[in-house]
Amino acid sequence: MSEQKSKNIKPETYDYDAVVIGSGPGGEGAAMKLAKGGLRVAVVEKYHDIGGGCTHWGTIPSKALRHSVSQLIELKHNALFTNNYPQKQSFTFADVLRHTEQVISKQVSMRSGFYNRNNCSLHFGEASFVDNHTIAVKNKDGNTEKFTAENVIIATGSRPYHPEDIDFSDANIYDSDTILSLDYQPQHIVIYGAGVIGSEYASIFRGLGVKTDLINTQNRLLSFLDDEMSDAISYHFRNSGIILRHDEAYKKIEAVKNGVVIHFKSGKKMKADCLLFANGRTGNTDKLNLQSVGLSPDGRGQLAVNPHYQTDVKNIYAIGDVIGYPSLASAAYDQGRIAAHVILTREGKKKLIKDIPTGIFTIPEISSVGKTEQMLTQQQVPYEVGRAQFKDLARSQILGSEVGSLKILFHRETKEILGIHCFGERAAEIIHIGQAIMEQKGQANTIEYFVNTTFNYPTMAEAYRVAALNGLNRLF
Ligand code: FAD
């Protein structure tokens, strides 16, 4: 580890004990823990509000949009409403965006309170390094202030990847940030990139009745998932009318009058009103003047860190999307708290949990924790499967949302839970019941917990009992 010391600055003369660059979940997690630990903390944010990409153009808007669209779908299909109440027949993207704006505003107001109550000094402007203890902040009026800090945490997040041969200034070519400015209702959208973000937006647009083509550069949808979950979401996407194309790559993206034409290497062509390009992300490191501290990000703008989230410069830490995988708000927050713990205690015993749950807010929703069947088969682990179909649960029938299932993978000898995979309404909540048991130590993390306890009835949680009985009955 190298440490480039600022000349003539002793620790007691630093303006702050720590400066956090970025106010997304990573920055917030770090800043709150440092402030509660008694340190003098400054947070620098280049956007005009705190909350990060997470609040303003990532997680929160996409989840609020998804929720509104899912409610619309329910209204359209629930006979109780369709038979008895006249309804507005169609809603536009602009209609559902309004709900999103309300949520963002509540989030900003609540999170601003955290900084105020914990005496974190907020600086709005773009931060860059002068040296490893000095930060320059250029505000929107062009003025620059400088201050010093003993520790610096980089939590600057990431942005959509823009290949040079695509003209993102064209009015009909969007990325996952600019799509929130879409002010007309397209008849037809092509979404290029079938990762989590592309798949979630495919659900949103299809739910609004937009003809939706989802282009996957790989040969399976969300191939990191358990095969059964990937098959299920592919089936439901196709069933809802999404056209899913695998193994495609664009050759040229051409802006035409009132639309976009995508030319594929496979020889196909597709014309749509607009394109959402959602294929890859780049770490926000280019404006940080990292060369002044001797750090160089990789080709995707990401920084390398050790398990304590320290970069190659000892007093500079990096957390969240700017360090790459898993690039989740949930993980970014915890990484921020771990980096702060290292700064506060100078020890690094705290670590991010091994099995980070995945929540994918498609329609239907998917969530997983632990190993997939493919992994266990490859590792030659003798596992068994317990399944519950949501359509067999009283609660699902009452809710009128019978699509979905819960699958528990467990060791057939020790009965230890090895993986849990769920799809259907509230999957991302349901997964946490199983996760809590899976993380118990000793004999407490077995599937038998679910048959030895009593569940509220009727609930979705009851799926665990049904799946556990199903799995245990397979043993001989
Ligand atoms: P961010 O939240 O991106 O915050 C970084 C902040 O740093 C920004 O406010 C930025 O303005 C600021 N900044 C950048 N450079 C500078 C600078 N030089 N000076 C000062 N400030 C700077 N994750 C989930 O867990 N669940 C989801 O459902 C989910 N859905 C998503 C949907 C979409 C469409 C997208 C794009 C992402 C989604 N994510 C989701 C990922 C999640 O949003 C990110 O993992 C998370 O925001 C990363 O947090 P962060 O703190 O690293 O960065």
Image (spheres, rainbow, N blue to C red):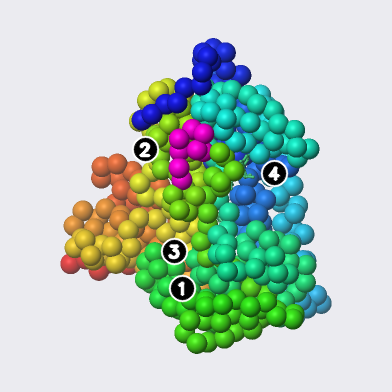
Report whether 387 appears left or right of 99.
left
Mark 4 = which residue? 47
Q: Which disc number belongs to residue 67?
A: none
Gap between marks 1 and 2 measured at Cα: 32 Å
Residue at (58% x, 54% y) in the render: 159
Q: Residues within 10 Å of mark 4 (few under 14, many from 20)?
A: some
| Image position, residue 148 (x, y; %) | 59, 23
Residue that badge 3 annotates:
422
Task: Using the image, tell me which numbered label, if any, was put on residue 307.
Answer: 2
Question: Earlier along the polypeptide chain: callout 1 or callout 3?
Answer: 1
Q: Amino acid at mark 4?
A: Tyr
Q: Decide if ligand 1 comes within 8 Å of the CB at mark 4.
A: yes
- Asked which quadrant contains residue 179, the reply is bottom right
How far apart, in angstroms, are the residues tagged by discs 1 and 4? Answer: 32 Å
Amino acid under label 1? Thr
Q: Is residue 50 visible?
A: no
Spatial CA distance of label 1 from label 3 is 25 Å
Taking the spot 33% from the left edge, 43% from the top edge, the residue there is: 440
Q: Can residue 291 be found in the magenta stretch?
A: yes
